[in-house]
Amino acid sequence: MASRKVFKLGESVLRKKSKQVVEFDEDLWQLLDDMKETMYKNDGMGLAAPQVGVLRRVVVMDVNNQYYELINPEIVYQEGEDVDTEGCLSIGKFKDEVVRPYKVTVRAVDRYNYPLEITGEKYFARCTCHEIDHLNGILFVDRSKHGKEFLAKKEGK
């Protein structure tokens, strides 16, 4: 395992859409292991592959002391509404309120291409939505209460 560079706001890879994983091999397993180490080293709750420069639909998360690896994840059900503060390893110190579903069900596969379906509430739902957004080139500041002002300030507008 090795820690990888976390790409930051302004780097184009964060705004691109990730491709489906089709090969479940040692390269994928290495990516997952590296992402896990990178997430923990940076004191994160979740990490998506684009954040380490890889445009594949791969997410790792640690929510409520439970570690998850989600490959090709998709939210198939959502319910309720939850407003809470989010941050992001790719954004830096800025944190802001974001509205997310209170409960989600996500379908994905694991590192061996076995299907998973997980339903979770509150932080699991928030983290899952946040990381899947990364796979679609969306950052939490795009959805947050003061994100437009933050982005304008960062871009010098």
Image (cartoon, rainbow, N blue to C red):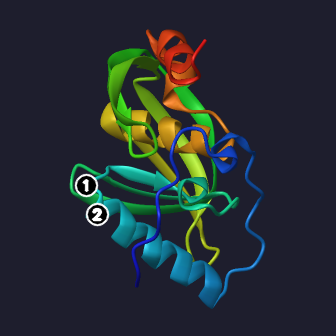
Residue at the spot 32% in from the left edge and 30% down from the top edge = 122
Quadrant of res 96: top left
Amino acid type, residue under disc 2 in the picture: Tyr
- Label 1 amino acid? Asp
* Nearest to the observer: residue 39 or residue 80: 39
Residue in the image at 45% along x and 75% along y:
34
**Residue 43, numbered circle:** 1
Callout 2: SS = helix
User: Is residue 135 found left or right of 130 in the rendered image?
Assistant: right
Where residue 137 appears, as percent x and y from the top left, is 67, 39
- What's the distance in space between the residues labelled 2 and 1, CA to CA? 5 Å
Farthest residue in the left direction?
65
Q: Quadrant of the C terminus?
A: top right
Q: Are marks 2 and 1 in contact (CB under 8 Å)?
A: yes
The residue positioned 54% from the left and 39% from the top of the image is 9
Mark 2 is surrounded, within 10 Å at the Cα level, by few (under 14), some (14 to 19) or many (20 or more) other residues, namely some
Q: Is residue 75 left or right of residue 128?
A: right
Q: Secondary structure at mark 1?
A: loop
Q: Is residue 142 above or below residue 48?
A: above
Q: Position of residue 131 (x, y in %)?
A: 51, 44
Q: Position of residue 101 (x, y in %)?
A: 46, 23
- Is residue 54 left or right of 87 when viewed as pictured? right
In the rendered image, which residue does mark 2 sit on?
40
Give how far across and how far down residue 71 sits, in percent. Answer: 61, 62
